[in-house]
């Protein structure tokens, strides 16, 4: 597991640099004086290309998880781990190359599907740290024959938490679509979603321990 996890981490770090390099070139063309809100108007074909690139990114990360694992939850854990490492190191490399973001509270366009996600850099990093912790727990338990079993209600709880987190990023979509300044990020809504998701995972851990006992 450690060797596989190290290989997945290496992929995530390298892919984070590739993603950062693409953004460096985009900002050179559309934000020569530095990235900031309100956003510059981008041609439709560039926007569609960026959406396609994000879809391709997810396919690549899912593929890594599928190849690294065996059971569904193990594969999902490797995907979550790769995604989280990629996301964190994307910002690490942007800081190294562009000295951006200025702070962990700097706003960014985080994702484009189904609509632009807007929020401070700290928020997706927090999510990524949680994903790394949860995925490592799942993978360690898989190796020791104590798998985490998420039943229907626990999956629903985790998914609801994820939806609330994503909704917190979509609350200020207009800032991206209409070239406006983003408002104050709803940390309370974000925290609520994060807590619900963590609670669902902790519930699954507790029930899995009882089943094994």
Image (spheres, grey):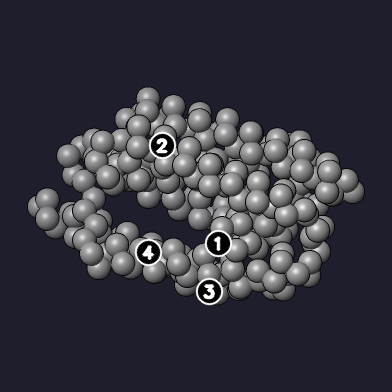
Depth check, front residue: 209 or 90 = 90
Residue 81: in sight, yes or no?
no
Question: Residue 213 at x, y = what percent?
Answer: 10, 52
Q: Contact, CB < 8 Å: mark 1 with mark 2?
A: no
Q: Contact, CB < 8 Å: mark 3 with mark 4?
A: no
Residue found at the far front of this picture: 45
Picture residue at 60% right of the left edge, 37% below the top:
16
Identify the residue position indicated by label 3 in the image: 189
Question: Residue 183 at x, y = what percent?
Answer: 72, 73
Who comes first in sequence, dot 3 or dot 4? 4
| Within-10-Å neighbours for mark 1: few <14, some 14–19, many 20+ | few
Identify the residue position indicated by label 1 in the image: 114
Who comes first in sequence, dot 3 or dot 2? 2
Who comes first in sequence, dot 3 or dot 1? 1
Q: Nearer the viewer, mark 3 or mark 4?
A: 4
| Within-10-Å neighbours for mark 2: few <14, some 14–19, many 20+ | some
Q: Contact, CB < 8 Å: mark 3 with mark 1?
A: no
Identify the residue position indicated by label 4 in the image: 159
Label of residue 63 in the image: 2
């Amino acid at each position: 597991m450690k060797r596989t996890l190290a290989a997945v981490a290496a992929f995530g770090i390298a892919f984070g640099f590739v993603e950062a390099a693409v953004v460096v070139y985009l900002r050179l063309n559309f934000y020569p004086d530095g990235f900031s809100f309100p956003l510059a108007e981008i041609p439709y074909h560039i926007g569609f290309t960026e959406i396609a690139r994000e879809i391709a990114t997810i396919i690549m990360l899912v593929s890594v998880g599928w190849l690294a694992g065996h059971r569904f939850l193990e594969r999902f854990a490797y995907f979550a781990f790769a995604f989280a490492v990629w996301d964190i190191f994307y910002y690490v490399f942007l800081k190294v190359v562009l000295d951006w973001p200025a702070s962990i509270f700097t706003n960014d366009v985080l994702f484009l599907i189904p609509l632009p996600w807007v929020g401070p850099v700290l928020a997706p990093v927090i999510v990524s740290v949680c994903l790394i912790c949860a995925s490592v727990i799942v993978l360690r338990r898989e190796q020791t024959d104590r798998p985490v079993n998420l039943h229907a209600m626990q999956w629903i709880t985790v998914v609801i938490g994820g939806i609330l987190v994503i909704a917190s990023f979509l609350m200020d979509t207009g800032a991206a679509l209409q070239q406006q300044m983003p408002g104050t990020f709803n940390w309370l809504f974000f925290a609520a979603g994060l807590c619900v998701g963590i609670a669902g995972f902790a519930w699954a851990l507790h029930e899995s321990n009882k089943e094994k006992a």
